[in-house]
Image (cartoon, helix red, strand yellow):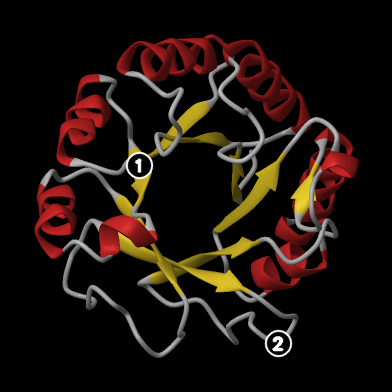
Amino acid sequence: MNKTFIITSIHRSWHGSIQLAEQLILQAKLGGASSILIDTNHAAMTRETFSHLKKYADTFNLAVVGRIKNKEEIDWLQEEQIKIHVISDEVMQKPVLCATMIQSGIPALAPLKDENNFALGDDFKNVKYIKIIKSNNDIPKSFEENLVGIIDNLNDHNDNAIESVKRGSKIVMKSFCLDKSLYDAGFIDVDDLLAMRKSLNKVEL
């Protein structure tokens, strides 16, 4: 059984197309992802679209991670029984909305820019942190109870993911696309994802 929870983020690669989003979900599943991150911060994202993509991911037994931008969308997470959500920078800047999300009880991942600054503190049992990797030197020396993973948008290689898992990371988030030649560095495609899963499985033995 795969131990590392790989989150494939499609927020910059689905471009408001349901058909493209479905292809990304399918390819993520084939590549060995644990989940797909569906971000509502897009003009084309509606309640109906969110529900459709959640149901589509369910057909492949692919977990959905949500990331929302307002109070109304917290209901989306609850109604669709989303098991985990990522707190966006936008929400982090809105204390009341952030508190409402935390109080929903849905397990949350909060991006961590400074390893020594847990923006929301470390007292919330349903909030864990994932470190944003901006350079090869950003990988924490170890992963503790509240620091559980990384967001790696640095490149399309697996080095940071592998090293972080060796140090105790349980979660790796990467931006996912169908054709990485169309995007900036940091995106991975299904071949990269397959290679990552294979490498991580070896580390986990």
The quarter of the picture where the N terminus appears is top right
Q: Name the residue under label 1.
A: 84
Tell which circle, 1 or 2, labels the residue nearer the N-terminal end.
1
**Where is 204 relative to 41, above or below?**
below
The answer to which of 44 and 128 lies nearer the viewer is 44
The answer to which of 62 and 119 lies nearer the viewer is 119
Q: Residues within 10 Å of mark 1 (few under 14, many from 20)?
A: many
Query: Would residue 36 appear left or right of 67 to someone viewing this image?
Result: right
**Where is 169 relative to 172, above or below?**
below
Q: Identify the residue at image location x=19%, y=61%.
A: 94
Distance in Å between CA atoms under marks 1 and 2? 28 Å
Q: Quadrant of residue 137?
A: bottom right
Local SS, label 2:
loop
Q: In which quarter of the image is residue 18?
A: top right
Local SS, label 1:
strand
Q: Quadrant of residue 39?
A: top left
The quarter of the picture where the C terminus appears is bottom right
**Where is 103 relative to 23, above or below?**
below
Residue 16 spot, x, y in % from top left: 56, 23
Residue farthest along the bottom direction in this orientation? 116
Q: Name the residue under label 2.
A: 137
Query: Would residue 183 appear left or right of 90 to someone viewing this image?
Result: right
Query: Would residue 121 appear left or right of 139 to someone viewing this image?
Result: left
Residue 178 spot, x, y in % from top left: 80, 30
